Amino acid sequence: MHSTVVRILRGAAAIAVTGSLSTAAQQTAPPQVTFQDLRDGLKDPARWLTYSGDYSSRRHSPLTQITPENVSRLTPQWAFQTETLGKFEATPLVLDGVIYVTGPEDSGWAIDARTGRQIWRYRRDVPSGIIACCGRVNRGFGMLGDRLFKTTLDARVVAISMKSGAILWDAAMEDFKKGYGSTAAPLVVKDKVIVGMTGGEYGVRGFVDAYDARNGKRVWRFYTTAGPDDPGHRTWRGMDAQAWEHGGGATWVTGSFDPELNLVYWGTGNAGPDYNGAEREGDNLYTASIVALDADSGKLRWHYQFTPHDVWDWDSTQVPVLADLTIEGRPRKVVMFANRNGFFYLLDRATGSLIRGTPFIATSWAKQIGADGRPMLLPGNIPTEVGTRVCPDQSGGTNWMSPSFDPALNVLFVTARDSCGVFYTWKDDYEPGLGFRGGAVQRVNDVHHAALRAIDVTTGQRLWEFPYTSQSWAGVLSTASGVIFAGSSGNFMAFDARTGKNLWHYQTGSALYAGAVTYMLDGRQWVLMPSGTTLTAFALPDAQLSTLNAQRSTLRVEP
């Protein structure tokens, strides 16, 4: 039995710096979010309705009130403190003056976007025995109609009332005692709630699920390890004949959607055991890949495997970014992917064919990506019992932190890292619920460099970078005015999109494990950044706004 506590509190967890009380908490009926609203994405700049801002996952806002010239005047307006253990990894959603955000330990809040006052709090009792590889976190809500949707640490999907935070339905994905869980923000498409799962380290079989938004019934499931009836089954060979049944391929980061092609794009995790490939000879489809699934049926339309037979733990669970580009004089509908293995990929999003693959960090395992789409491996990079030095290390050239794409500049901004590790492997049998322990990685400290990097997506070349003093797990937000928001450790920063110049920074006091969002409210552009267990909202001072409004009667918004 799964119990849920919903608490209605007003202001107890918020520190109001400035602003007045909103009427949001007094609403008699919540707004209705339609599929068309989700398709429109950021056309209404007062809203941020999906994990990545829109279905293309560009995290690029059309807002222009905050500019390279005035961003240095950005000041905090309020802070909301959760009073929970753990940290924010979630992207807040914003709808008609209310912020909806999830936190650690399967918690969530509705917050007044003007003042930071709490409207309601959702908290789920997490059962004992949870197996959480990489933190008891959650990355955000999805929304449709008057409902919010989230995944849980005990491998469930829940629907929540926007108005009250009460549970409307609760559906089981899998048995958490077998190592399954979920932390990804749902992707809501039409009437379906599409979700991924965690547990690749514990011998689970990965999948992407779709649930009916009305009642929580599962509509379809796509397995990311190919079974006997799947075309890719012959890519699982070796000493363990049943390797595919516990082969990993977790799907723990939210995907993207192309409404015209009706395709959902989702990254898949590494195969297991992580470093001992002898147990699972072959390419191990569909792990370390991107899969394009029919949104209605979940059927595989195409796949592209970034790291065949991955033995370095390079999950391909980064965010796929969709765009229409002109490549060598030809219009192309592409999906862009800055991969953990250190290469930046352009793929045709209708067919999955490779357009270009170029390194965006220093790599030692592969020379380049061949015309057949496969990496051209360099010798001496397979893990061994005595250790093998490989670049990048297991955390990769980037990870789950979201990139941003500016379509006017044709530039992708990504949190990147150059690093190497010594990879070890040894045989260790699979144990249900415990997985594999057949290897380890030790970081090489003489090569470790983190930066915000700007990549020309038409050529794959690096345009500029801003080096960080330490590793960053922060996502990136870009705006039409040419301001980039990103950061490292507890330093939230703004940059010039064309040059990479650091224009502003603010010490949040805690490390950044999420990306910022921005929204327009009452004629004012706000920037919201999660850090540690605090949300901080920034805006230009009132005096600055008065000057801007005197110069132009209406705010210019990029069409």
Image: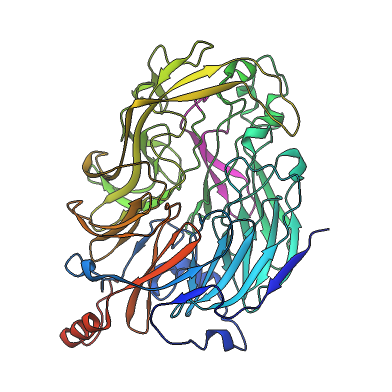
Locate the N terminus and report the quarter of the image it occupies. bottom right
Residue 434 found in image quarter: top right
Left-right relation of 26 to 365: right
Residue 355 visible to the viewer = no
State yes or no: residue 257 in magenta: no
Give above or below for 505 relative to 369: below
Give above or below for 252 relative to 509: above
Relative image position of residue 503 (x, y in whole percent): 20, 59
State yes or no: residue 300 in magenta: yes
Residue sitting nearer the eye, 84 or 126? 84
Left-right relation of 408 to 370: left
Left-right relation of 200 to 405: right
Tell me the residue at 43%/48% (across/down): 401
Locate the C terminus and report the quarter of the image it occupies. bottom left
Residue sitting nearer the eye, 471 or 295? 471
Q: Which residues are magenta?
A: 286-312
Residue sitting nearer the eye, 168 or 209? 168
Give above or below for 355 relative to 58: above
Relative image position of residue 248 (x, y in whole percent): 63, 33
Residue 244 visible to the viewer = yes
Left-right relation of 532 to 448: right
Residue 432 found in image quarter: top right
Tell me the residue at 35%/21% (across/down): 364
Residue 445 found in image quarter: top left
Relative image position of residue 348 (x, y in whole percent): 40, 43
